[in-house]
Image (tube, rainbow, N blue to C red):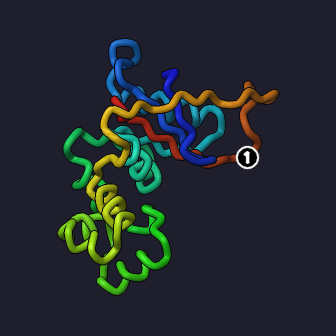
Amino acid sequence: SPRVEEVAADTVVLDLEGLEHLFGSPREIAGEMARIAAESGLAVNVAVAANPEAAVHAARGFAGITVIPPGEEAGVLGRLPLRLLAPPPEVEETWSLWGLRCFRDLAALPETGGAERLGPEGVRLQKLARGAGTRPAGSALPIRRPARRRDRGRAPRGRARLDGACGPGAR
């Protein structure tokens, strides 16, 4: 896909929309990505979801290949630990006091109460815990091409870890 975003040093998001007729189902594309990475000496987790945020959390939280059917994000992500949301320390402390441990716990809270106690950041994190994307509707995935490197064709020495995530229609 020409639509690639480097979310972090170890995380890449690809927009798979429209690629099925060229490369197969999202699961087949994810499998091929994992196979190529393994041949290059990289240990990767690959996730496919309807929005990039859900895909990134799944790739960071589950080993191997994860394909989340549209509408099932909250159920699949529910058992992930809240630390994957990278909350500010004060929010993390509040969650701990409330006994919240996983995405499911946070997603189950009423949104109104969370907004009153945790503010806009708490609402944003709760949406992520529910598997909802937080990008504005219709926002396109930026096209960011990887930097050219001299060692591009060589496999890295040792084993590196790269969490890949991809989402059809990453909007």
- The amino acid type, in three-letter code, at marker 1 is Gly
Q: Is residue 107 left or right of residue 96?
A: left
Q: Residue at x 29, y 57 (%)?
A: 127
The image quadrant that residue 117 belongs to is bottom left
- Residue 81, how many percent across, how many down? 38, 67
- Residue 119, how many percent across, how many down? 34, 70
Q: Residue at x 43, y 62 (%)?
A: 85
How many dots with numbers? 1
For disc 1, the neighbor class at 10 Å (few under 14, some 14 to 19, many from 20) is few
Q: Is residue 105 above or below residue 171?
A: below
Quadrant of the drawing holding the C terminus: top left
The image quadrant that residue 61 belongs to is bottom left
The image quadrant that residue 96 belongs to is bottom left
Residue lying furthest right: 150
**Nearest the eye: 131 or 75:** 131
Residue beneath label 1, please? 158
- Residue 122, how many percent across, how many down? 35, 67
Q: Is residue 77 above or below residue 139?
A: below
Residue lying furthest top: 22
- Residue 147, how many percent across, how many down? 70, 30
**Nearest the eye: 139 or 143:** 139
Element type where label 1 sits in the image: loop
Q: Residue at x 35, y 59 (%)?
A: 124
Q: Residue at x 52, y 46 (%)?
A: 163
Q: Is residue 31 left or right of residue 137?
A: right
Q: Is residue 14 above or below residue 110?
A: above
